[in-house]
Amino acid sequence: MIEIEGLTKHFGPIPAVAGIDLTVAKGEVLGFLGPNGAGKSTTMKMVTGYLAPTTGRVRICGHDVESDSIAAQRCIGYLPEGAPAYADMTPRQFLSFIAEIRGFRGEQVKAKVDAVVGKAELDLVLDQPIDTLSKGFKRRVGLAQAILHDPPVLIMDEPTDGLDPNQKHAVRALLRAMAPDKAIIISTHLLEEVEAICTRAVIIDRGRVVADGTPAELLARSRHHNAVTLALPTAQAETAKARIRMLAGVATVEDSALANGLVELTAFPKGGALLIETISALVVAEKWDVNELYAEAGRLDDVFRAITTHDADRAREARIS
């Protein structure tokens, strides 16, 4: 549903996007990640037809964004950064205006507006000027206009920016509910968002794709993948650290002091080995007074930093060649 081939964008001599190839299929929610200046927003603007690429092409549902732009844009719901809207309009007026621009007339307009007002939970502010709304409600107005025409493709730049935890939960639930029938790209700085709603994640750096996989595949590249952490009294910590370090499959053990006389030990595995059962059995056998014990799936921030900070040591830790 989204096909990107050889996409580049230069601003003078500066390459903002340096050659991106990407496809997104129906049912995929793609988390689009990268540090500031990596080219995320520029790429999304080219995908939607807002910016023309220097080279390359984008097709939306088979329509070329440059040569068949109106047909392509009919298929897109776009939530840009900042969610711009007419400040003097109310959400009801603005969404009705968007519905008419999208080609709906008469009762269709009311039906479309009513549907998205419920999904974006805008009932309480429907007749207030948009200029008076909180950042969170303005963002939800932007979300409502993006999904109003029920497009097959959604392109969303920081969709939960400015939302409180309850609102984030509601928006994520809405996106998950829509996902089976759509192709969705979400640009975000929130790694928790990738784990919460994305079926796939792409990391770009310096205008190029540097990682592409499911969240689970990226987590497996983290040094914390299958790491085991336990907290126990200071008096037992040194003995426990030495005993755990001797276990097969343990690469290293790190410690840090906690409050209330506890020490936290984290055992990192060799080659992603499973350690939780072995360490749990050791805790029982040694009768340590463990306050907590858990294994980690991994940390996306490990992988993100290793890839985008150009740090060789971090890259090795994350097992990235």
Image (cartoon, grey):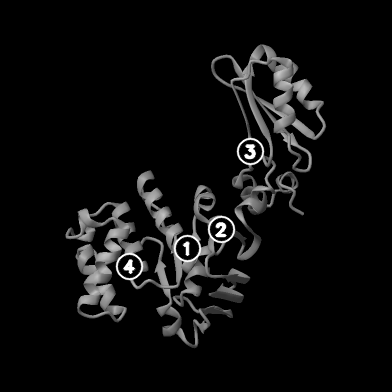
Residue at 35% across / 62% down in the picture? 143
Mark 1 falls on what kind of element? helix
Residue identifier under label 2: 199
- Mark 1 to mark 3 CA distance (whole Å): 27 Å
Estimate how packed mark 3 is, as few (under 14), some (14 to 19) or many (20 or more) residues with alpha carbons within 10 Å: some
Residue at 63% across / 65% down in the picture? 208
Q: Amino acid at mark 1?
A: Ala
Could you say where residue 74 lies in the image, as x and y percent from the top left?
A: 40, 79
- Mark 1 to mark 2 CA distance (whole Å): 10 Å
Q: Quadrant of residue 137?
A: bottom left
Could you say where residue 167 lies in the image, as x and y percent from the top left?
A: 35, 49
- Mark 2 to mark 4 CA distance (whole Å): 24 Å
Residue identifier under label 4: 145
- Mark 4 to mark 3 CA distance (whole Å): 39 Å
Closer to the camera in the image, 94 or 149: 149
| Viewer-nearest of discs 1 and 3 | 1
Q: Quadrant of residue 55?
A: bottom right
- Mark 1 to mark 4 CA distance (whole Å): 17 Å
Residue identifier under label 3: 296
Q: Counting residues from the N terminus, which is met first, the one under dot 1 or under dot 2?
A: 1
Estimate how packed mark 1 is, as few (under 14), some (14 to 19) or many (20 or more) residues with alpha carbons within 10 Å: many
- The image's mark for residue 110 is none
Q: Counting residues from the N terminus, which is met first, the one under dot 3 or under dot 2?
A: 2
Q: Amino acid at mark 3?
A: Glu
Q: Counting residues from the N terminus, which is met first, the one under dot 2 or under dot 4?
A: 4
Closer to the camera in the image, 270 or 295: 295
Could you say where residue 104 lies in the image, as x and y percent from the top left?
A: 27, 79
Q: Is residue 201 left or right of residue 133?
A: right
Mark 2 falls on what kind of element? loop
Q: Quadrant of the C terminus?
A: bottom right
Closer to the camera in the image, 93 or 114: 114
